[in-house]
Amino acid sequence: MNRIVRHIFVTALAMTLSSAAVFAQEYVSTPVEISKERVKIDGKICYSHIVLEKQTLYSISKAYGVSLEDIYRFNPTVKESGLKKNSIIIIPSPEALKEEPESGTPKNTRTAEKAETKKEQKSVTEKDAEKKQEMVQQEKEKKPVKEKAQRIHIAKWYEDLDVISEQYGVSVEEIMTANNLKGRKLTKRQKLIIPFPGETEASAPEESDMNTVAEAVQEESQIPVVETDTLEIPLPKTKVDVTLMLPLTTADGKSSRNNMDFYCGALLAVYDLAESGTDCNLNVYDIHRGESQTSVESLKNSDVIIGPVSSADLTQLFNTIGEQTLVVSPLDPRAEKLTVSHSSMVQIPTPQSAQYKDLVKWVEDDFSAGDRVVMITEKGARQSTVTTVMKEALDSSSLIYKTFSYSILEGRDVTRPLTELMGTEGKNRILVASESEAFVNDVIRNLNLLVYNNIDITIYAPSKIRGFETIEVENLHNTSMHVSLAYYIDYDNPKVKNFLLKYRALFNTEPNQFAFQGYDVADYFIRLCSKYGADWRNHIESQDKDMLQSSFRIRKERIGGYLNTGVRRIVYENGYSVKTIR
């Protein structure tokens, strides 16, 4: 381990951006496969496409049958920053494009045109009557109409006029006119009058209006601003010492992209916490640059250590510092085994066993009178963890269930015996206890045939099913697939949208799953340390929280350290929509 590099955020950010520039790549077109993952963005059905190495915007646009402008419209930063390996971009479906406004005609402009046309249709008599009524009302209130309550918006550092315009449903031009803006550039915490649609006149605001706003701003400035994407935990102004240990470079000196993305997400969390009043001293180690004896005391004095990633590096860390400081294992599911022997370790990636148990609990939560429960397993296959854990969970539950087992070679002959297992009154809840892609694909195909025969079926399956490329995505929606996941990002979530805006503004690129994880882990644990100080480990089990892509339900094991048991539940619904249940 190298010596501690103490960062203030601006310096760390500059280093990160510099690293991102150094490792930019030239891309050569490669084949693009249509993503089977569809999501709803603002009510529009879109594809969630993971960018692979050396894919280009041109090849992606051709594969999906969309234009480059279509991609830019749904991914604002891509036009300037280009693509990044493993980042997620949103590709509009043909249905989404049909719902889009005609090209060249902005939505706000068309709305204003319609309003103007409607306004012109009023007769002169009507206008005169309205004017008289307005004069009477002004005289009655003894003050100008313009002095009525105004909406005031405080611009955040990552917002621009387009974002604010969309938020309030008024045009950029109306906001600029109401505030006498000469250009589109905003400053951090700039106060803006937000007019109601159609109220802004062509003239600039009068001095009396600005005085009213100034008074409102002065009053508002006495109230602490609370961001909408913060945890619901009080944040006393205490300093938190956090150590981040990641292999930021590889053995051959190149940048480790995924770990750098995790680092960027953590930096953004530190920035947000500083805005909320939490002072964090972030110490960063690149563990691939050697070790220094002078760093051991600093490690022991940290409130929390995030990282390293691999089991080998974690073991070396515990051998160095002992069990004095809590160590968070942030990324590698295989590190779970270390929690048995280390009481101060917190394993964040949710183990697969917790996902399997949650599926059974989900069936139990949904179960109604008349329902049937069937667990399907693969005949002749070696007993797997998913089968063992599901059966134990079913046996421990209140559910009465049946087991159906067949081999993939029997796949075309099982429709009849499967039908005989199904009930006709309630819902048939099917647990698929396998992670074999070939077998699961065959099970989904057969159950989909039963659905077409008007048998009411709901399937509950492990998270790996989302990565199986041979399964038709239509079958997942037809069978109302229920999946328990360790990670899931709901892009309609306002907190996720805020994170995207900030990340794009800081790093000029799209965040991937590692960036989301870096933010979640840093934000959660720094807040715990801030609230409880040295005693925070005794309160961790009471601080369950749904983050941007992870759910934290951290529990102390009977022997050893702590495990995160949090899962996300999603349902594949009709119309290619995916609904987040939890």
Image (tube, grey):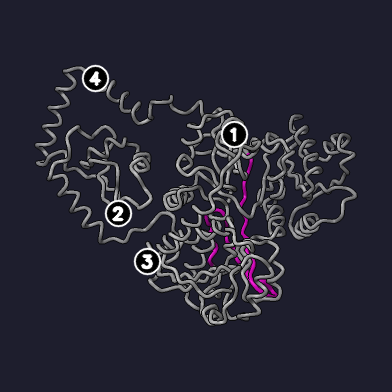
Write the residue at 65% across / 52% down.
Answer: 485
- What residue is drawn where x is 53% and y is 68%? 244
Q: How would you rate the neighbour count of disc 4 (Cα within 10 Å): few for under 14, some for 14-19, many for 20 or more? A: few
Residue, x 71% and y 46% (percent of image)? 465
| Residue corresponding to mark 2 | 189
Front residue of this view, candidates 147 and 268: 268
Helix, strand or loop status at disc 2: loop
In the displayed structure, does residue 84 sit left or right of residue 150? right
Q: Distance between the residues labelled 1 and 4?
A: 48 Å
Mark 2 vs 3, N-terminal side? 2
Q: Which mark is residue 277?
A: 3
Tell me which amino acid carries mark 2: Arg
Q: Which of marks 2 and 4 is in front?
A: 2
Residue 102, above or below 542: above
Q: What residue type is labelled 1?
A: Ser
Which mark sits nearer the N-terminus, 2 or 1?
1
Q: Name the residue under label 1.
A: 59
Q: Considering the image in quadrants, where does the N terminus appear?
A: bottom right
Q: Quadrant of residue 133?
A: top left
Tell me which segment is drawn in magenta: 543-572
Gap in angstroms between the C-alphas marked 2 and 3: 16 Å
Residue 469 at x, y percent in the picture: 72, 40
Circle 1/circle 3 CB separation < 8 Å: no
Identified by mark 4, the residue type is Glu
Residue type at mark 3: give it: Gly
Give how far across and how far down residue 293 sits, in percent: 57, 82
Which x, y percent locates residue 203?
17, 34
Label 2–label 3 contact, CB within 8 A: no
Write down the residue under mark 4: 120
Q: Do the residues labelled 4 and 3 touch (CB within 8 Å)?
A: no
Cα–Cα span, label 4 and label 3: 52 Å
